[in-house]
Amino acid sequence: MDIKEIQSLIKFVAKSGASEVKLETDDIKITIRTGSLTGNSEPTYVHTMPMAQPAAPAPVAAAPAAPAEASTPAAPAAEAEDDKYITIKSPIIGTFYRKPSPDKPVFVEVGDTIGTGDVLCVIEAMKLFNDIESEVSGKIVKILVDDSSPVEFDQPLFLVDPS
């Protein structure tokens, strides 16, 4: 099982509403718990460890494949509408914040001109606040995520007009 399959499994579990999923294969054992037990909506890795004996729950492994394939064609259709814009995507899973703290102003607004290295937002992951910096220069055309919303890895956050 590679990292892409594990990420697909995490996304599937988070969207399914299940509070816990355990998966055992020949070489690994994974338990994923969503935050519904603690009030947090983020999925959490509990442990991943090599297995000594083989076990093969094929129905569980096959279930994430269908949602992952179904969601893939939708992303290119959305990007096709905005071909001239650059999409800035989330590098991590976490909670998206437009401000550094509740009493501070937002980092960027629609219409703001940004440069390479400018902080656009912060994403909180496991109680750590990560500055998300722009890798491009341009003008913010659209903010695609609401403040204090959970975001997935590689989810579009901003549209930037590079011209």
Image (cartoon, grey):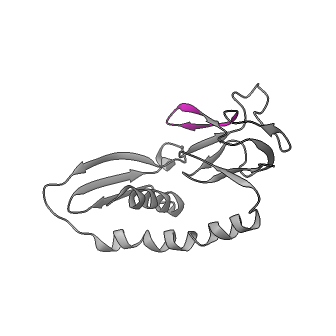
What residue do we see at 76% from left, 25% from top? 103
| Camera-nearest residue between 99 and 86 | 86
| Camera-nearest residue between 62 and 17 | 62
What residue do we see at 24% from left, 63% from top? 25
72 vs 144: above or below: below
Left or right of residue 16: residue 26: left
Q: Measured from the top left, where is residue 100 in percent x and y?
A: 69, 28
Considering the whole magenta stretch, tell me its main secondary structure: strand
Image quadrant assignment for residue 116: top right
Q: Residue furthest front?
A: 163
Number of marks present in the image shown: 0
| Camera-nearest residue between 9 and 69 | 69
Q: Measured from the top left, where is residue 38 in percent x and y?
A: 49, 42
Image quadrant assignment for residue 40: top right
Q: Residue furthest top?
A: 103
Q: Residue furthest right?
A: 111
| Camera-nearest residue between 57 and 113 | 113
Q: Measured from the top left, where is residue 7 in percent x and y?
A: 44, 56
Decide whether residue 128 is among the magenta residues: yes
Decide whether residue 92 is among the magenta residues: no
Q: Measured from the top left, where is residue 66 in percent x and y?
A: 47, 74
What residue do we see at 79% from left, 45% from top? 140
Left or right of residue 86: residue 1: left
55 vs 44: above or below: below
Chain part drawn in magenta: 118-130
What residue do we see at 64% from left, 68% from top? 76
Q: Quadrant of the N terminus?
A: bottom left
